[in-house]
Image (cartoon, coloured by chain):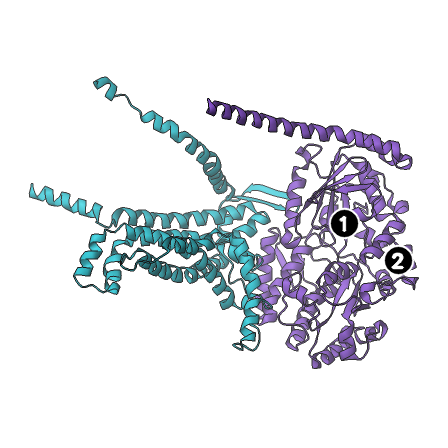
């Protein structure tokens, strides 16, 4: 008898818990419209923006490789309400949910996952379809390709790039356009690079930490090499590793790695220059031999207070996203100045995915993010970004009252803004990420003295053909 | 009574086997056939464009079977042997100690658990741990420098010997516990009478080990060797994580499955299929050896002995 009662109780509790589950899901689905009503009632001015959203899907799926976009959205977007505790879902004020799918960029993982999802896009249900995805400058052309047609032209969701985004840097618009000049993505940032250096090392080895004077000592590669010699005498290295100069050379190539329609990789003379200079500088002791490449623990440690590395060539996001979290000393120990070469590194593009059921929301987010000068300036100041607004950046550059605490009150935009004006980027291809990653890893062996130049070349050819099976030949200068 | 006896219950056996064969057919057999089929096609995805499938005959096989293939087979074999030799030696010693009735080791169960523990950690997590330990600014280098043993840091992952050894050491640490327990089982299967008799005859422990224990567990040893070799062929996660999928320096820790993984990431189904078929054939040959050993080399020589006995019996008749 006892046993029977017990089993009945167990069964009853199971049923109860099942019912409870059903109850909550029901509850949440009824909550959403209620919340919507509320926002429409309480905020009259936002009602206009949210009204057409009524017919749209309730879920916006976003593919990205880090939390950069999410953090900025939370900071700047006026429709942002709250984010769930585990960070996977963000709620907007009208009840729409943004679901984040984040995969790491390294080794092409993000692209693989995104590609798989894009291939399934046509068969996915409306709530599972990707609505927004992000891409980086290294592979933006792959997704803005007119034939692939995975990113919607901005005009299709009601954005006119010529008027709505007139204040953006022109090169950021060119980069996000397909071969016919149709813009299929937009970015909130431009990424001119500066030489970011340690003030204490500058004072010790070079006698000054003034950005203008330091610039004179790193104004071109030959001068920088002399300076590197001086630093070495004091026991410092000018930069952490050979990978730190790669983007300066690699983003100044004269033609793309792979030209449109071709299946041959062209290694540019600039890349060979980088290999030769890197070997020379490494052998001369201007780099830290312990650091292999970037984005690893050894590299991050060179940004600590015990490190002997003088500086890094980094864009604005690099100061906030890379140096700051790894710096363990006082604020104000770093400074920024013009480096030996103007170049652009990175940039995250927002794309509306073909097949989305939330075009209004995407338009709203894109405009708030990349076409709104006030927002862009707020993001710039909050995150030490470089906002994609020409007039806004000019204002910040001329604003003497603005200074970054991390850079000792220096206003880095004095240097960033002119550097951004010099950038042209017309040499992108869909193969850039693989080429950039593999040429660095293949030639690491050459720099370490494990293999000779020819063997490193052969290893690069093997690796790149594995990554991209359609590549037929590799042309060296 | 007779009628009841002839009722066959065999069909229940087959019915109970159905789930296995069904899952095997769906999840193993169909993919296997599909792999072989794909290996004859040019079929890959380049970014968002799909190329193929176009029938190309044996082209994929010819492409895969280049100098690279032999190099990666060599790499895989070297990585395996570096890990296997210490693994089998240590496992044999431990198993002999643990099963020796005269030693009476206390806390045997505790040690059995401890030596098995490294196997429970995920290989990738283990690789991350070793990557941090042996990195240029990592604890191993710092300890060695602080103790004054070396002056400058050792670039473990920058040298062929260093990175291969680390992979070997990791495989050894992960698998010696497993092998020890397997060998222990084999040794416990040997009758204690034999050991006692040997002891009475004045055998030293070394003699007992080499003349009695080893010959009697030979089939299990052979089994360990072959399964470990097949496992070694599939070496992937440790070198993949340690070298970020590149197998550097100079592609010297690039294993066959890392190659397969790179094909599949592209993804190039054709060449991945061809490589898989090669691996299938190699594994098949190794399995054949296991089968032979298990059947012909029984400790009491059952098959051969039986054959001989039958022959002798016939002759006598």
Q: Chain of mark 2?
A: A
Q: Position of residue B283 (x, y in %)?
A: 40, 49
Query: Residue at coordinates 68% horizontally, 71% vertically from top-left?
Result: A307
Q: Please, what secondary structure does the residue beneath circle 1 have?
A: helix
Q: Nearer the viewer, residue A420 or B14?
A: B14
Q: Which mark is residue B23?
A: none
Q: Is residue A124 above or below residue B111?
A: above
> On the picture, is A161 further left or further right than A290?
right
In the rendered image, which residue does mark 1 sit on?
A71
Q: Nearer the viewer, residue B41 or B147?
A: B147
* Cα–Cα span, label 2 and label 1: 21 Å
Q: Position of residue B85 (x, y in %)?
A: 38, 62
Q: Which mark is residue A393?
A: 2
Q: Chain of mark 1?
A: A
Q: Residue furthest bottom?
A: A233
Q: Which chain is purple?
A: A
Q: Quadrant of the N terminus of chain B?
A: top left
Q: Position of residue A411 (x, y in %)?
A: 86, 64
Q: Residue furthest front?
A: A2
């Amino acid at each position: 008898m006892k046993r029977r009662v017990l089993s009945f109780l167990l069964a009853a509790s199971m049923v109860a818990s099942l019912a409870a589950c059903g109850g909550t899901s029901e509850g949440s689905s009824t909550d959403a419209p209620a919340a919507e009503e509320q926002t429409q009632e309480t905020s009259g001015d936002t009602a206009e923006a949210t009204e057409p959203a009524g017919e749209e899907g309730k879920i916006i799926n976003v593919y990205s490789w880090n939390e950069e976009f999410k953090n900025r959205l939370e900071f700047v977007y006026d429709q942002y309400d709250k984010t769930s505790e585990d960070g996977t879902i963000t709620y907007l004020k009208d009840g729409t949910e943004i679901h984040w799918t984040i995969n790491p960029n390294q080794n092409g993982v993000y692209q693989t996952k995104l590609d798989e999802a894009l291939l399934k896009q046509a068969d996915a249900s409306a709530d599972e379809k990707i609505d927004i995805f992000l891409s980086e400058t290294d592979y933006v052309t792959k997704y803005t390709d007119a034939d692939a047609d995975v990113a919607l032209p901005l005009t299709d969701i009601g954005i006119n790039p010529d008027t709505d985004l007139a204040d953006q840097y022109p090169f950021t618009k060119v980069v996000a356009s397909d071969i016919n000049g149709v813009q299929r993505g937009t970015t909130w940032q431009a990424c001119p690079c500066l030489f970011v250096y340690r003030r204490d090392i500058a004072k010790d080895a070079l006698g000054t930490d003034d950005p203008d004077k330091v610039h004179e000592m790193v104004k071109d590669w030959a001068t920088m090499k002399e300076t590197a010699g001086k630093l070495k005498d004091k026991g410092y290295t000018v930069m952490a590793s050979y990978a730190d100069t790669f983007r300066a050379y690699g983003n100044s190539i004269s033609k793309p790695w792979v030209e449109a329609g071709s299946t041959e990789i062209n290694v540019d003379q600039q890349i060979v220059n980088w290999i030769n200079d890197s070997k020379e500088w490494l052998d001369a002791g201007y780099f830290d031999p312990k650091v292999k490449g970037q984005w690893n623990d050894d590299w991050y440690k060179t940004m600590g207070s015990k490190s002997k590395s003088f500086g890094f060539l980094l864009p604005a996001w690099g100061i906030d996203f890379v140096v700051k979290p790894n710096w363990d000393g006082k604020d104000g120990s770093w400074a920024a100045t013009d480096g030996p070469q103007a170049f652009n590194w990175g940039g995250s593009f927002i794309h509306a995915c073909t097949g989305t059921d939330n075009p209004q929301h995407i338009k709203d987010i894109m405009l708030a993010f990349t076409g709104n000068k006030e927002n862009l300036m707020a993001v710039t100041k909050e995150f030490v970004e470089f906002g994609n607004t020409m007039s806004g950046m000019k204002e910040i550059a001329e604003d003497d009252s603005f200074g970054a605490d991390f850079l000792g009150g220096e206003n880095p935009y004095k240097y960033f803004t002119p550097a951004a004006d010099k950038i042209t980027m017309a040499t992108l291809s869909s193969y850039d990420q693989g080429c950039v990653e593999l040429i660095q890893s293949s030639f690491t062996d050459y720099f370490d003295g494990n293999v000779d130049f020819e063997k490193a070349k052969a290893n690069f050819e093997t690796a790149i053909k594995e990554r991209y099976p359609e590549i037929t030949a590799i042309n060296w200068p | 009574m007779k009628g009841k006896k002839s009722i066959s219950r065999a069909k229940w056996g087959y019915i109970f086997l159905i789930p296995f064969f069904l899952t095997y057919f769906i999840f193993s057999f169909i993919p296997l056939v599909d792999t072989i089929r794909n290996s004859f096609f040019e079929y890959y995805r380049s970014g968002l464009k799909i190329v193929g499938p176009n029938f190309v005959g044996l082209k994929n096989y010819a492409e895969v079977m280049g100098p690279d293939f032999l190099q990666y087979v060599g790499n895989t074999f070297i990585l395996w042997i570096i890990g296997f030799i210490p693994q089998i030696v240590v496992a044999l010693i431990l198993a002999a100690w643990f099963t020796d009735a005269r030693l009476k080791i206390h806390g045997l169960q505790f040690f059995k658990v401890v030596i098995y523990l490294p196997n429970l950690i995920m290989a990738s997590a283990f690789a991350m741990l070793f990557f941090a330990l042996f990195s240029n600014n990592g604890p191993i280098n710092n300890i060695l420098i602080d103790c004054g043993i070396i002056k400058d840091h050792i670039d473990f992952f920058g040298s062929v010997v260093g990175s291969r050894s680390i992979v070997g050491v990791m495989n050894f640490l992960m698998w010696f516990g497993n092998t020890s327990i397997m060998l222990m089982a084999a040794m416990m299967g040997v009758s204690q009478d034999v050991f006692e008799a040997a002891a009475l005859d004045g055998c030293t422990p070394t003699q007992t080990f080499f003349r009695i224990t080893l010959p009697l567990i030979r089939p299990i040893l052979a089994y360990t060797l072959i399964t470990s070799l097949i496992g070694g062929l599939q070496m992937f996660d440790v070198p993949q994580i340690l070298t970020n999928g590149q197998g550097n320096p100079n592609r010297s820790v690039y294993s066959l499955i890392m190659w397969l993984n790179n094909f599949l990431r592209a993804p190039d189904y054709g060449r991945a299929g061809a490589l898989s078929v090669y691996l299938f054939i190699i594994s098949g040959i190794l399995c054949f050896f296991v089968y032979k050993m298990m059947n012909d080399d029984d400790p009491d020589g059952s098959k051969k002995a039986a054959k001989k006995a039958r022959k002798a019996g016939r002759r006598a008749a």
